Image (tube, rainbow, N blue to C red):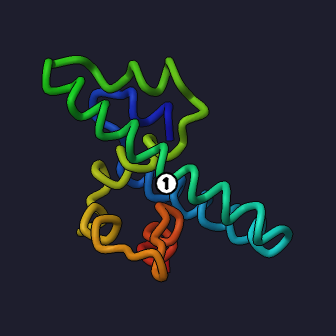
Amino acid sequence: MQSQLILENPDKNALEQAVRDYVDIMDKRLAANNEYVQQELEIETDEGTATYVGIQQYQAGNIDKSSLANRVPSETGALLCLVMDEIGVDDWQDSLNSQTKDNYVTLYSILKEWVD
């Protein structure tokens, strides 16, 4: 994902395949250790979207998004948000904003729904 996002014209097909691979890996990890991975997904979603919002604000000053991919590669949540923007995942931000305490939404769950 990172290598595509730093390109001036990312390959949408490569990003879509990376999302499919991500969902496949997370499915396997969830099956192996659901409780731990679910907590990790929640952190990825919370911290990643916060970083994503910061990047969007930073970019408003015409700063290149490659700074994320090169500077903080462990922040997958922000990368996933950028990928969803790039590949056109509809209403992903609305899904996050409409979640409730009883219906927690993760970036993974949004991407899983998009892949399926």
Give the total number of marks visible in the rendering: 1
65 shown above or below 102 = above
Q: Position of residue 40 (x, y in %)?
A: 66, 55
Amino acid at circle 1: Thr
Relative horizontal placement of residue 57, taking residue 37 as reference (left or right): left
Q: Residue furthest right?
A: 32
Residue for point 74% across, 70% down:
30
- For mark 1, does the 10 Å Cα neighbourhood hold few (<14), some (14 to 19), or many (20 or more) residues? many
- Residue 15 percent across, percent down from the top left: 44, 50
Q: Circle 1 sits in a helix, a strand or a loop, which is it? A: helix
Please report the residue visible at 24 percent of the width from the left and 68 percent of the height from the top. Answer: 94
Report the side of 27 relative to 74 (left or right). Answer: right
Relative image position of residue 31 (x, y in whole percent): 80, 75
Above or below, 15 against 71 in this view is: below
Is residue 77 or residue 39 the one in the foreground? 39
Q: Residue at x 27, y 20 (%)?
A: 64
Q: Which residue is mark 1?
A: 45
Q: Is residue 26 found left or right of 104 in the rendered image?
A: right
Task: Report the front residue among 116 and 100.
Answer: 100
In the figure, residue 62 lies in which quadrant? top left
User: Is 64 in front, or is 15?
Assistant: 64
Give residue 12's position: percent from left, percent from top. Answer: 35, 51
In the rendered image, which quarter is residue 114 located in?
bottom left
Residue most extreme to the front: 101
* Residue at x 67%, y 60% (from the top left corner): 39
Within the image, what quadrant is residue 68 found in? Answer: top left
